[in-house]
Image (tube, rainbow, N blue to C red):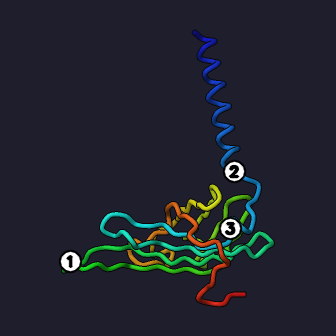
């Protein structure tokens, strides 16, 4: 019985190490990075989405622009939304980019390129720390909707 438990422990350990290695890549190419990614809302907010535009700049840098919403129904029964935007430069290492839209670093947006055409985004910091409207959050799974070099609303050097 003891040998069986030890064997089971080794199997779990090697499975965990293999899964961790499979989830982290040394780098991602510009073709995978460049484009427009969207995370769609469902239910009564179907057709609404959060959008992230990303452009590889080289040298471990990405241009990132977020256009986010928090859709809701008003007391009068009308559809409305709180919004949040951010635009700047992210640092990328391997398959993970880090972007901080505020100067004091309380808000951190982590973008992980999980596979071709999909990113997982997580946000550390609340909406106000990120400069977003009430309940607006960047976290979620985004699918690439356009692989062309994105056009940004503002020029940034």
Residue for badge 3 = 33
- Badge 2 marks a residue whose secondary structure is loop
Marks 1 and 2, how far apart at CA: 45 Å
Q: Residue 134, image x and y in percent? A: 38, 75
- Residue 141, numbered label: none
Task: Pick the residue in front: 151 or 135.
Answer: 151
Residue visible at 62% across and 60% down in the picture: 112
Q: Residue 57, image x and y in percent? A: 75, 76
Query: Dot 3 surroundings within 10 Å: few (below 14), some, or many (20 or more)?
Result: many
Q: Is residue 43 left or right of residue 91?
A: left
Q: Earlier in the sequence, mark 3 or mark 2?
A: 2
Q: Earlier in the sequence, mark 1 or mark 3?
A: 3
Q: Residue 77, image x and y in percent? A: 20, 77
Residue visible at 31% across and 73% down in the picture: 72
- Residue 77, numbered label: 1
Residue for badge 2 = 24
The quadrant of the rendering that contains the N terminus is top right
Task: Pick the residue in front: 144 or 17.
Answer: 144
């Amino acid at each position: 019985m003891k040998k069986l438990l030890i064997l089971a422990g080794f199997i779990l350990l090697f499975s965990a190490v293999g899964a961790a290695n499979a989830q982290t890549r040394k780098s991602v190419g510009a073709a995978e990075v460049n484009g427009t990614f969207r995370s769609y809302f469902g239910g009564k907010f179907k057709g609404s989405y959060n959008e992230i535009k990303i452009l590889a700049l080289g040298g471990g840098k990405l241009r990132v622009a977020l256009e986010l919403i928090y859709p809701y129904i008003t007391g009068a029964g009308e559809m409305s939304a709180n919004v949040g935007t951010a635009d700047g430069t992210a640092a990328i290492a391997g398959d993970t980019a880090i972007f901080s839209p505020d100067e004091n670093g309380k808000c951190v947006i982590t973008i992980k390129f999980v596979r071709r055409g999909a990113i997982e985004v997580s946000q550390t910091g609340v909406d106000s720390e990120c400069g977003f409207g009430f309940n607006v959050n960047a976290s979620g799974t985004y699918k690439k909707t356009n692989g062309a070099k994105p056009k940004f609303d503002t020029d940034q050097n």
